[in-house]
Amino acid sequence: MSQLWSNSDDHSRLIAGEIVEVIPGIRRLLAPNPSLMTGPGTNTYLIGSTDIIVIDPGPRDDLHLERIVQAGGGNIRYVVVTHSHRDHAPGAAPLAQATGATLLGFDERPDFVPDGRVAEGDMLVSDRWRLEALHTPGHSSDHLCFIADAVQPGQPRVVFSGDHIMEGSTVVIGPPDGDMADYFDSLRRLRELEPPAEVIAPGHGLVIFNPDEVIDIYLALRLNREEAIFRSLSGGPLRVSEIIPMIYSHLPDNLLRQGGRSIWAHLRKLHQEGGVSSPDRDDPESKWSITSS
Ligand SMILES: [Zn+2]
């Protein structure tokens, strides 16, 4: 059977400022904001041709926004963000203003004020793809994924995953807005989609063509990490800062803080499940211990 879509993507196609049609009717434009946390930078997606939905305009970068406007050719109808983090959302309001598009997001935040809210199950329709919103808290409480089905048959089911799933790395879960228990639930929801996703278009990195496998790896890595954190407490109560060197022996200094937040996020989940206790779960530097049964 011939395939209408290409099932490959590579780093030579991930160049800031270059438009790449990753799936028919879905174009990617990489923002020029590479960093430790954003990898190659933020992926902005343009969906459709005559009625375009833009997902994640990225940072407020004039040149990047100009490129989006140009690629949109006057046809951008909606600008939507997967979540309000600063590498995804600050460009959204100026883009909506420049194009007359409607700005959408999960809710209002200090730095992000949408024209309208997108809730679980809401549909956004372009000329070539229909998008359904899925509320996927975990990385942030306002995180949305979008399940895309083509108007014409013959295209794969695509999920725009924002920072819920990235290509080539795991995701930072930073409490209190990030929540590890929610994150596990949101990963499992994506894994159980019916029909399943065939492609993930992430907020950072290349297109993922084996979604189920990647989600299973994500879940296994997290569970592994969580077990190691639990075991680290077997010798007695510890603070997050004391657990870091027991869990991360190879982490460069500039990532240790994120590692600590991730450990804290796991401890809060374990606390919620009754496995560990702490005088104050909102304070990472309080002592954590295994709950005696
Ligand atoms: Zn984020």
Image: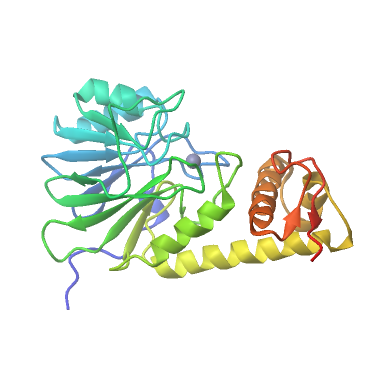
Q: Position of residue 139 (x, y in %)?
A: 51, 46
Residue 123: x and y in percent read: 22, 47
Seen from the viewer's position, the closer of residues 287 and 30 is 287
Q: Residue at x 88, y 57 (%)?
A: 236
> Where does the C terminus fall, quadrant-wise?
bottom right
Relative to 47, residue 63 above or below: above
Which residue lies most toward the front here? Answer: 293
**In the rendered picture of this protein, how many numbered marks are placed on residues?**
0
- The quarter holding residue 274 reads bottom right
**Between 67 and 225, which is closer to the camera in this rendering?**
225
Residue depicted at x 33% and y 29%:
92
Viewer-nearest residue: 246 or 10: 246
Q: Quadrant of the N terminus?
A: bottom left
Q: Which quadrant of the structure image shows residue 291?
A: bottom right
Give the colour scheme of this rendering.
rainbow
Q: Position of residue 175 (x, y in %)?
A: 61, 41
Please report the residue visible at 19 percent of the width from the left and 63 percent of the height from the top: 155
Asked whether residue 36 appears in the rendered view, the answer is yes
Judge whether residue 169 can be spotted in this image: no
12 shown above or below 281: below
Task: Locate residue 73 relative to residue 266 in the image: left or right.
Answer: left
Q: Find residue 254 and report its horizontal and vertical position in percent.
A: 69, 40
Q: Is residue 161 left or right of residue 265?
A: left
Q: Residue at x 34, y 30 (%)?
A: 64
